[in-house]
Image: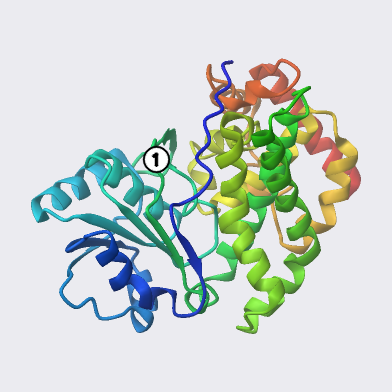
Amino acid sequence: MTMNLTLRPAPQEYLCQEGAYAQLPGKLAERFIKKVLILHGENAYRVAAPFLPEFGNIEVITVQFNGECSDIEITRLLTLFKAAQADAIIGLGGGKVMDTAKAVGFRSGYVPVILLPTMASNCAAWTPLSVLYTEDGSSTGFEVYAQQTALLLVEPRVVIDSPIAFFIAGIADTLAKWYEADAILSQVEQPSLALDLCRYAAQQCHDIPLALAQQAVTDMRDKNPSYAWLKVMETNIMAGGLVGGFGDDYGRTAAAHPIHDALTARTETHVFLHGFKVAYGVLVQLALEDKWSEITKLAPFYEQFKLPQTLADLNLSELNDDALLTIAQRACAPGESIHFLASPVTPERVVDTIKALESFQQQAN
């Protein structure tokens, strides 16, 4: 497969502190924005409202997100955005809201995109891409944008009140960045400086969660914005995005995310958050790489946060070989990043590996 290395490291401006939202009017004025559309999640606006400022002379239009970053939803919002003749779009909510706002901004002709994530469940607020889904929640791939987000504001007081399950999903998704990037970067004999920075960011995606996630989750339950919680929260949002920002194809995904994408075709998995399905994909990738000792090493971490380790943990215990092959064929479709692994991967090999992983986990328990 052809590997790209175009650097899009970060949003143009990033602020994470109490009172971050209060700077919105000034930041919009600096960008000559006079009318803005706010796309928000169902509960996000209510949660964020106490921290949002008065916008003064800036006209604000609010629109509720319909739930999926799909072509249908993007088209609906694009029509509303153009009819309103807005100068910019603000995404307020979770990862799919972030991705939809970015897609609308791109398809509107690269208007400024401002993102206000209300949870730390992934790096969507950082990355210049959108993961796309069908209306029923099946992943259809992603599109990468040439322009970064204009402004990213994180208000810790909002994020700490978000559901803990989303925070844990973010931790799992962040951890995957290390394993996927390492699988690719280990094949590069003479990495550029950009790839060195990519590897450093990926290493933080491993080291920080393993060291601080337990304390961070405890502190989040206590509504305590401690050092540990802030560090893990920013790692979820920032570090994962930096891996792809500096590494492009070398640091974005390997096998774990294609396994996730294939799993989304099974409606039984729709009750599980993105990061939980990616966590299972990490184990499949490690098994494909014959890194069984690493799976054993991760087991306590997975058990602590109730991350899926078997098909049964994903409501898929009844899958037969044909169903497994369908999942594997989708994960191994031409152009998928699973083919970035060092050894060739076929659908049949993925099926055999999933079965081997099932046996390994049964023996471990």
Q: Nearer the viewer, residue 10 or 130?
A: 10
Coordinates of residue 185 in the picture (x, y in percent): 73, 30
Is residue 311 at all visible to an observer of this figure? Answer: no
Pinpoint residue 143: horizontal percent, then vertical percent. 41, 34
Assign the N terminus to one quadrant of the image.
top right
Please rate how many residues cluster around mark 1, counting C-alpha atoms within 10 Å: few if below 14, some from 14 to 19, many from 20.
many
What's under tag 1, amino acid-wise?
A: Tyr
> Relative to 146, is 188 above or below?
above
Which residue: 74% across, 47% down? 309
Location of residue 37 (image quadrant): bottom left
Location of mark 1 (residue):
133
**Dot 1: element:** strand
Image position of 218 with respect to 289: above or below: below
Q: At 54% from the left edge and 20% from the top edge, which residue is drawn?
A: 333
Q: Is residue 5 left or right of residue 202?
A: left
Residue 31 location (% of width, % of height): 27, 59
- Left or right of 159 in this view: 86: left
